[in-house]
Image (tube, rainbow, N blue to C red):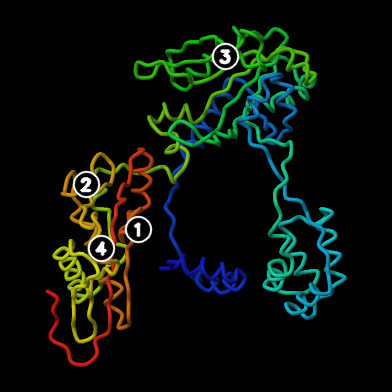
Amino acid sequence: MAAFDTGEIKSKAKSNFTDAWIATAKLIPTGTEISLAKKGKPHLVRELIQKSRQILLDLGFDEVENLTVLPDSDVVKQYGPEARVILDRVFYLAELPRPDIGLSARRIAQLKKIAEEIDIEKLQAILRNYKKGEIEADNLIEELIAGLGITDYQATELLDKVFPEMKELQPVPSGKTLRSHMTATWFHTLAVLQDKASFPVALFSVGPRYRNEQREDARHLRVHHSASIVVMDPKMSLDAGGAVTRDIMQQYGFSDIKFETKVATSKYYAPGQEQEVFVKYKGTWLEIADIGMYSPVALANFDINYPVFNAGFGIERLGMLIYEIDDVRKLAYPQFSVTEYSDEEIAKSITYIASPETARGQKIARAIEETARRHKDEIAPCEFLAWQDKSIEVKVVEKEAGKRLIGPAGFNEICVANGSIYSDVVPSGIHTGINYMHAIAMGAAAAIESSNDNLTYQVKGIRHLSDLNLQIPEAVRQHIEGQQKKIGVAGAVFVTIESRPVRGKINEPSGK
C-alpha cells in the first residue's frame, strides 16, 4: 500500500521543485487493480438540486443557464444607491498580468545551462505570443516543449530558474464579480428572451451563489446553491407569484406556509413588493425563500418591458430541513461531514505521535517519567540519572539556575468532558490515563531507543497536542471544532532529557 511521507516530499519540493516532481513519480503504484462498489452514493445537495429541477420542470418552468461572472455595474443598475452595501458581500475577480520577458545575455547564458540546444529566436516568439494572449497560460509548458524541442524537466526549470518574474506576479483587481444573487444575472437572460417567447415566460436556474461572508459556520457558506425562478408576463403580480411559490413548496413536502412583507425592500424589487416565505417545521416558523416583483427601474436599466416575478430557494437551507441536519457545512462538504464522537471515543482517539517500539524503549520511558516525578521540585542547576545500560545513559536535566527541574504543568492530566480536550491537575471528566510528562517521556524514549549518539530532547512550552507528542484523528478534530469545543492543553512545561553513549565499564541497568 502506497503511503506518502508528505513532510519529506514537501521539504524536497521546497528545495528543488522540478527534481522532487520527477523523483516522486516512482512513488505512484503501477500495474494494480482495484474494485469499486457496485453503486456510489449521491451527494445530498446534488440530490436535492435534481429534485428541485424535476419539481420546476413538472410545474412548467423551462431551465436556463445564467451568467456566473458579471460587471459590478450590473449590481448598480439593479440596486441603485444600495449597490455599495451589496457589493461589500461580493467576490471581485482579479487577474494576473502577462509580463514582458526580456532575454538579456545573462539570461541566455542561464538558458544554455539548462538546455544547450535551445533556439533563442523561437523562445522569443513563444514569449511574445504568450504576452499577446495567443498562447493560453496552461499551454505554455507544452508550447515550450514542442516549439523548442526540450524536455518537460527543462521547460519547468526554465520558468522556475530563469524567469523569476513569473513567480512574482501579483493579481490586478478588475470590475468583474461572481454573482452573489441569481437575480444579478436574470436581467440579461430576460432582456434577450422577452421578444422571443410567448407569455408567460417561466424560467428557472439552479446554480451556485458566491457570498463574501466574514466566516463560514453552521449557518453560512461562501458558496451555496439557489433554485431561482422568474415569471415574466404583462399581467404578472405578486399575488400570482405567491400562488406559484405555494405550489412549489408543497412539492417539497411543506404544507403550512405563510408570507410576510419585508419592512425594508431590496431596491431591485418594487416598494412593498418583496416577501419572505416561511414554513412550519417542528412547530416553528422558519424562513425558506424570498420572493418579489422586480422594480420597473431595475427592469428599465436592462431594457426589459414587462413585469417580472422572482423567487429564490436556498438549496442548502432546504436540505437542512428535509434531511434534518443542524450544520450546513456537514451537508455541503465532506470534510465537515463529521462523525459524532462521545467523550469516551475522543479520549480513546488520543495517541502518541512517537512511542517506543521495544521493551527496552518502554522501560526507558517509564524511568524518565518516574525520575521526573521524584525530583520535579528540585532547583536547578541539577541533573538526575534516569536510565543506564551497556550503551547509553539518560538524564533529566535543568541548567537554568533557580528554575525547578520540571515546569508547573509537567504532570497535568489529559481529560475530556463535554466534547473538549483539556488538562487538569488531577483526573476529571473522562481521564485518558496520560499526563504531560508521560507523553513527553514516550516521545523521548522513541528517539533514544534507536540511537547511540548524543541526543537532547527538549520541551519548552505547550500550546498544541503535538507539543506533547500527542495527536488525534482529523475527523475527531473536525468534530470538536465543528461543535465549537476546545482542545485546551496549554501549560508551562520545561523539560530537558539528555542521552549520552556510555564509555568504559558500567553497572547493570538502573532503570526499573
Nearer mark to the viewer, of 3 and 1: 1
The residue indicated by pointer 2 is 344
Question: Percent position (x, y) of residue 340?
Answer: 31, 41
Position of residue 192 in the picture relative to residue 465 (left or right): right
Nearer mark to the viewer, of 4 and 1: 4
| Residues at marks 4 and 1, CA–CA distance in whole angstroms | 28 Å
Nearer mark to the viewer, of 2 and 1: 1
Residue kind at label 3, given as amino acid type: Val
Residue kind at label 1, given as amino acid type: Ser
Q: Do the residues labelled 3 and 1 touch (CB within 8 Å)?
A: no
The residue indicated by pointer 1 is 466
- The kind of secondary structure element at disc 2 is helix
Nearer mark to the viewer, of 3 and 2: 2
The residue indicated by pointer 4 is 402
- Label 3 vs 2, first from the N-terminus: 3
Q: Residue at x 25, y 66 (%)?
A: 442
Most distant residue in the front direction: 402
**Which dot marks residue 244?**
3
- The kind of secondary structure element at disc 3 is helix
Position of residue 418 in the picture relative to residue 326 (left or right): left
Question: Percent position (x, y) of residue 11?
Answer: 51, 68
Residue kind at label 2, given as amino acid type: Glu
